[in-house]
Image (cartoon, rainbow, N blue to C red):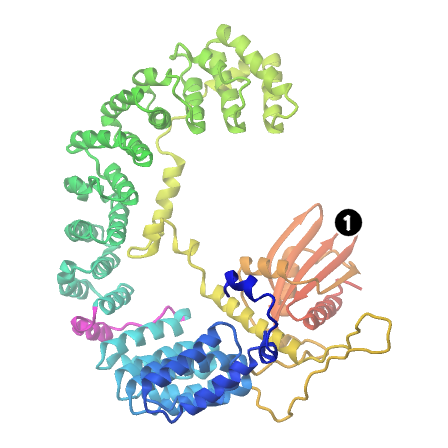
């Protein structure tokens, strides 16, 4: 399309032949079909490639070229791998969209699975396994079983991955396949062994993955050097799950793997360390020796990974993890290795600062304070703030050495405002643990450079807690009264003013009165803040001495709650996993297998529903005008004997029975919520409650479980019990069950992806509620 020619051709009428083809690519597809047919006997592979490329270009641009399917199947009779890849892409795309074309594609793949070239055999099997409809399973399994014993390792490893695909489609077809996969671990090719291990872990996930025996472990360790780096990492990761029978076996394995600690691949080194840590986790003395032994490889890896910053970051995260578990002294002598370099990105510098805060001790603190003091003046504000936080963390962890840190932080008062703000926050935490440092903090506390919201709250806390020792405390607090500040700051201000009032009443009486008046007379003020202010006001009027006793009660802070929570969560981290990098337990960022099973079930149900809608005969459609002509849309007749590869579920029967529901079916809360909100309202009933004695949560859950419907959420409020249930028949059914004991009613709302099942599910529940005499 060329817009600058539009004016010159606007007056020229289009030719009749061009008008015939305008907006219609049908003629072009026919021409392309003839072109493909003419090139079937062509010997020049380059010319044939260009024709196939044109077909793929049409397909990827959204044009329907399924008419060329027979010709493309015939074009697959070639030994050119480039053509094979493009033709297979075409076949798999249209085979999934049109079941009538699927047989031709399957026949083509089956033929190529017996090709003389092993690459073509493996590639054909790979595409055959990618056909994602259940009817292909009966053709897929024979090809997989034959390929598992193929002479070429590429075909064998492709067949192993095909087993995993079949497992996720229809696991019943994989009977006794585990035994064959276990035998393939003794294969001559290392890649086949690795694929077999991964396949066993997928198929046996519910049993904890592949079972390890002493004989198997010895065999894998004996062949460890034959594998590439990722293969070695896979075997070592499996080995970390093994439990040696005695110390002799444990030390033999560790001695055998010790040379792997010198490897240049970080994945192998981390995997070996994980094996050592898992073997010795119940032996504290040996565990500490292991940590000392692996220090040098970790520090070396962090140093040599400067060219690959992502790997360097991962290694530093694992060093931080070990140091945070109480082994910080192990890395104390290598503190200079964690100094920041000018050319390093911010995320590397931040993790290094966290490590420095953990490994600081009496003999390296002097040098480290000078280094961190330099980082405070860094042009990157994030680095500057993190350096101040690191200094504060050291002061909190080493209270005997905190004096030098507090004095150094006090010297930063003349620097930028953001530095002063961060120092105030750090001072608040230091003073919470050790109030004796208040004299060294007076100068910066009385500074007027505090501008950040969190820093203001920290300053107000310090003024309230140490108001008797800070001369200007009442007058600094007065500056915040009436200002447009956040609700959190006003809560802190109210508390601080009361604390200072009880130790300096003459100076604070008028200031406190202004604060009460400012909050209570403001109609737009937060209601909780107003209620709290009114409570303090009445308490001061009635019995101020009792209130003073409450404020004078002090609590000594030994360890912050945030630190305890972080340490508890760190115990759940698994070494050499993403949980160390994310600093979260695995359950918080990896969904369980059931979640993905539910997604696959949902995808299959969507396909079934879409196919049912296309095969149903629609009602006659009126054109909307007052004439005698009606437009009726009908579907073409369907052959009775046509093969059905998709195995569509049968239409719902007149009733549901218990045996048809899946036993112990499980889904997660997030999936239930998404389905409940996305499905339309299906069926609903309201019945009279006939008995109250079993109208409770436990009894209802047991009753529904008896009929294979499972509870996912429940709650009772104001004598109304509300419960949510789900079950799986030939599709999923969701229930909202409510008992209003005051009005003596039972309400049931049912939803399903298929509307017929929503009504049948409602009838199913209604029947067993009547049998239990809960409703009449």
Residue at position x 64%, y 81% in the image: 650
Residue at position x 72%, y 56% in the image: 693
Q: Find residue 83 and report its horizontal and vertical position in percent.
A: 36, 83
User: Can residue 179 be spotted in the picture?
Assistant: no
User: Can residue 51 be spotted in the picture?
Assistant: yes
In the rendered view, does 628 fall on the left or right side of 35?
A: right
Quarter holding the C terminus?
A: bottom right
In the rendered view, does 574 fall on the left or right side of 664?
A: left
Q: Secondary structure at mark 1?
A: loop
Specify start and end residues of the magenta stretch as a single range.
Answer: 207-228
For disc 1, the marked residue is 742
Give 153 or 497, whichever is nearer the viewer: 153
Whether residue 217 appears in magenta in the rendering, the answer is yes
Whether residue 766 appears in magenta in the rendering, the answer is no
Residue at position x 68%, y 75% in the image: 656
State whether residue 726 is above or below residue 638. above
Image-quadrant location for residue 389: top left
Q: Find residue 147 and report its horizontal and vertical position in percent.
A: 34, 87
State whether residue 679 is above or below residue 22. above
Residue at position x 61%, y 15% in the image: 517
Image-quadrant location for residue 770: bottom right
Give 128 or 651, whichever is nearer the viewer: 128
Q: Find residue 678 and report its horizontal and vertical position in percent.
A: 62, 60
In the rendered view, does 713 fall on the left or right side of 251?
A: right
């Amino acid at each position: 399309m060329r817009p600058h020619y539009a004016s010159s051709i606007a007056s020229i009428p289009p030719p009749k032949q061009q008008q015939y083809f305008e907006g219609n690519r049908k003629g072009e597809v026919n021409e392309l079909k003839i072109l493909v047919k003419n090139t079937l006997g062509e010997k020049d592979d380059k010319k044939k490639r260009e024709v196939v490329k044109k077909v793929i270009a049409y397909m990827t641009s959204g044009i329907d070229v399924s008419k060329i399917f027979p010709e493309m199947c015939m074009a697959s009779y070639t030994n050119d791998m480039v053509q094979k890849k493009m033709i297979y892409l075409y076949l798999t795309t249209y085979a999934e969209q049109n079941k009538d074309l699927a047989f031709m594609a399957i026949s083509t793949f089956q033929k190529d699975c017996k090709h003389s070239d092993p690459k073509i055999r493996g590639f054909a099997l790979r595409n055959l396994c990618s056909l994602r409809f259940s009817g292909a399973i009966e053709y897929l399994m024979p090809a997989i079983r034959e390929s598992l014993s193929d002479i070429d390792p590429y075909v064998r490893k492709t067949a192993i991955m095909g087993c995993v695909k079949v497992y996720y489609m229809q696991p019943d077809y994989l009977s006794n396949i585990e035994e064959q996969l276990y035998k393939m671990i003794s294969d001559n090719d290392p890649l086949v062994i690795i694929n077999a291990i991964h396949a066993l872990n997928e198929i046996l996930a519910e049993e904890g993955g592949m079972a390890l025996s002493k004989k198997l472990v010895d065999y894998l360790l004996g062949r460890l050097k034959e594998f590439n780096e990722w293969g070695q990492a896979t075997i070592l990761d499996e080995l970390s799950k093994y439990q040696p029978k005695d110390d002799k076996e444990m030390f033999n394995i560790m001695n055998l793997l010790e040379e792997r600690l010198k490897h240049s691949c970080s994945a192998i080194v981390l995997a070996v360390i994980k094996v050592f840590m898992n073997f010795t986790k119940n032996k504290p003395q040996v565990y500490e020796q292991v940590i000392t032994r692996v220090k040098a490889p970790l520090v070396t890896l962090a140093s040599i990974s400067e060219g690959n910053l992502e790997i360097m970051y991962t290694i530093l995260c694992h060093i931080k993890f070990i140091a945070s578990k109480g082994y910080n002294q192990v890395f104390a002598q290598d503190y200079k290795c964690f100094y920041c370099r000018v050319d390093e990105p911010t995320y590397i510098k931040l993790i290094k600062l966290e490590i420095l805060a953990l490994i600081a001790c009496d003999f390296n603190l002097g040098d480290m304070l000078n280094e961190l003091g330099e980082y405070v003046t860094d042009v990157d504000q994030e680095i500057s703030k993190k350096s101040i936080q690191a200094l504060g963390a050291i002061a909190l962890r080493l209270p005997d050495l905190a004096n030098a840190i507090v004095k150094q932080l006090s010297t930063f008062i003349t620097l930028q405002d953001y530095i002063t703000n961060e120092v105030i926050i750090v001072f608040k935490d230091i003073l919470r643990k050790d109030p004796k440092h208040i004299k060294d903090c007076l100068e910066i506390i009385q500074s007027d450079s505090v501008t950040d919201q969190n820093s203001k709250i920290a300053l107000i806390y310090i003024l309230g807690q140490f108001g008797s020792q800070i001369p200007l405390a009442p007058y600094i607090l007065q500056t915040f009264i009436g200002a447009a500040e956040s609700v959190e700051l006003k809560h802190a201000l109210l508390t601080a003013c009361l604390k200072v009032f009880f130790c300096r009443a003459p100076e604070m009486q008028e200031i406190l009165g202004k604060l009460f008046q400012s909050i209570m007379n403001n109609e737009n003020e937060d209601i909780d803040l107003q209620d709290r202010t009114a409570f303090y006001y009445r308490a001061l009027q009635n019995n101020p001495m009792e209130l003073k006793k409450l404020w004078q009660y002090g609590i000594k802070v030994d360890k912050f709650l945030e630190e305890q929570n972080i340490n508890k969560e760190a115990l759940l981290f698994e070494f050499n996993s993403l949980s160390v990098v994310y600093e979260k337990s695995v359950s918080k960022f990896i969904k369980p297998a059931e979640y993905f099973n539910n997604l696959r079930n949902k995808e299959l149900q969507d396909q079934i529903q879409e196919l049912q809608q296309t095969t149903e005969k629609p009602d006659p459609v009126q054109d909307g005008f007052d004439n005698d002509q009606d437009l009726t849309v009908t579907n073409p007749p369907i052959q009775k004997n046509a093969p059905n590869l998709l195995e569509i579920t049968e239409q719902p029967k007149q009733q549901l029975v218990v045996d048809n529901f899946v036993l112990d079916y499980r889904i997660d809360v997030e999936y239930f919520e998404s389905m409940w909100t996305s499905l339309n309202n299906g069926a609903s009933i309201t019945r009279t409650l006939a008995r109250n004695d079993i109208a409770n949560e436990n009894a209802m859950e047991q009753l529904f479980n008896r009929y294979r419907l499972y509870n996912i959420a429940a709650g009772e409020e104001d004598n109304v019990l509300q419960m949510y249930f789900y079950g799986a028949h030939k599709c999923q059914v969701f229930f909202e069950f409510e008992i209003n004991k005051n009005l003596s009613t039972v309400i049931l709302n049912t939803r399903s992806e298929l509307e017929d099942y929503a009504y049948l599910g409602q009838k199913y529940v209604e029947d067993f509620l009547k049998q239990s005499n809960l409703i009449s």
